[in-house]
Image: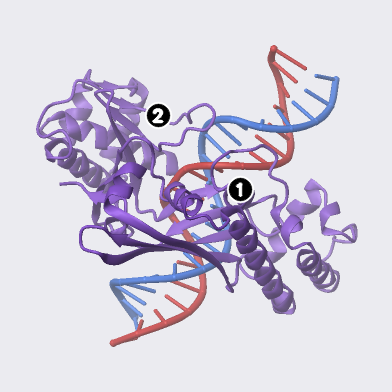
Chain colours: A purple, B blue, C red
Amino acid sequence: MATLRTEVTEIVTGLGMLGLASVDEALAMRPAAMIGVGDDHYRKLIAARDDGKHRVQFEEAWANGVAFAEAEDGLRGRVPRRVEWKGPHQAPSYEQTPADLRIDHVYLVSCKYGSRLLHNVSPGHLFERLLAVRQGSAGDWYAEVASVEYQALYQAARHYLAEHEEGFDDLPLAVTDLNADQHKRLKLPFSRRWPEPLAEAAHWFSVAVSQASAERWLSALGHRASRREEALWRLLRLQPAPYFVLGTDHRRRPVRYRVDTPWDFRQRFAFKSFDVWPEARVQPVVRWRGDLIVRATDTPVHVDGHVEVRWSHGRFQGSPEAKVYLKTPHLETPGYSELA
DNA sequence: GCGATGTATTGAAATCGTCC
DNA sequence: GGACGATTTCAATACATCGC
């Protein structure tokens, strides 16, 4: 279960900060300083501990909590009075700082285990509004930016289904006229990979969405360096206040860093450029890259990654999402400083 | 054949929107 | 203004491929 795993990593990271001897001692005593974790949560964690579920996560999270408690940049060995767990509830409206824990009202900590994902948002939110203002009703991005190729792909899909599958006689001519039930039924025949007869249409669809998304993004970014720099800050989740990220990378090595503020960022780096461009893959992708100069040493440094523009629940299923990945290792990313 | 790396899919749970 | 289905967002896991 994803939920249990998340609870283990977040709560145990917090418990590790309290100066106790072990995970099991912390779970048994249910320390008063740990706020927002109820008896049912402890029962679930103890049960998981007993059947050895998420054993690795228990160890990793505990080690991260301990490391933060001892770090010079962290708690420097002071035992915190309050470790608040934000819990499974998302904050009302749009909360930008991705904090799962708050220590003594001050230190914000985000737990990220095995993820290189920066954002997972609607395409319009990223490409047109630059992650700044969240708006309702996203609409179908594919139909909006690549209607011709989207329709062509659907047309190919209809022909394919007419020849190879039963029960698709009712499909409308236009992809935008599909109803909810028809959308659902289109999932199975195209799951995992496109059948060969659709490969070409799928390719041009992917190319068109990549190009159109990159174009929209470029036009929203404009030419002013300050606007582009700000967009890069948002992409990297820089916030007005610093916060910490504790977790592991995708190879299970511990990753502990502080996310600096735009002010810190400007002290250390001179902004050169932020660029985006389309890339042809099976699914639509837009690459991004920021180039900077380290002021202290006058040396260039860059940060890069990509955005997948994809259906989040299978082909032809609902509005697409934009998944933003960071390729640069966290500790080499400008604005992220290793916890010392 | 196997680990490392990269890509695609799935799942849970929140909020949003619409209808009554 | 509440019920409930739809949409959005969180992000982890599954799968594919590459290099040896």
Q: Is residue A73 above or below residue C2?
A: below
Cα gap from disc 2 to disc 1, whole angstroms: 24 Å
**Residue A285 position by quadrant:** bottom right
**Mark 1 closeness class: few <14, some 14–19, many ≥20 residues within 10 Å:** many
A224 horizontally vs A11: left or right: right
Residue A156 locus on image (x, y percent): 80, 72
- Side of A270 where A171 appears, left or right: right
Res. A194 visible in picture: no
Q: Residue at x 69, y 60 (%)?
A: A188
Say which mark, if any, is on residue A80. Answer: none
The percent position of residue A89, horizontal first and vertical second, equals 47, 29
Specify the quadrant that holds the N terminus of chain A.
top left
Identify the chain of the residue marked 1, using the numbered disc in the image.
A
User: Could you tell me which residue is drawn at 47 percent across and 50 percent down?
Assistant: A226
How many numbered dots are placed on residues in this image?
2
Q: Do marks 2 and 1 share a subunit?
A: yes
Residue type, label 1: Ser
Residue A17, percent from left and from top: 18, 33
- B14 versus A335 height, above or below: above
Placement of A18 over or under A129, stated as above or below: above
Residue corresponding to mark 1: A122
Return the x and y of residue B10 as percentages of the image width and height: 56, 53
Which residue is under mark 2? A87
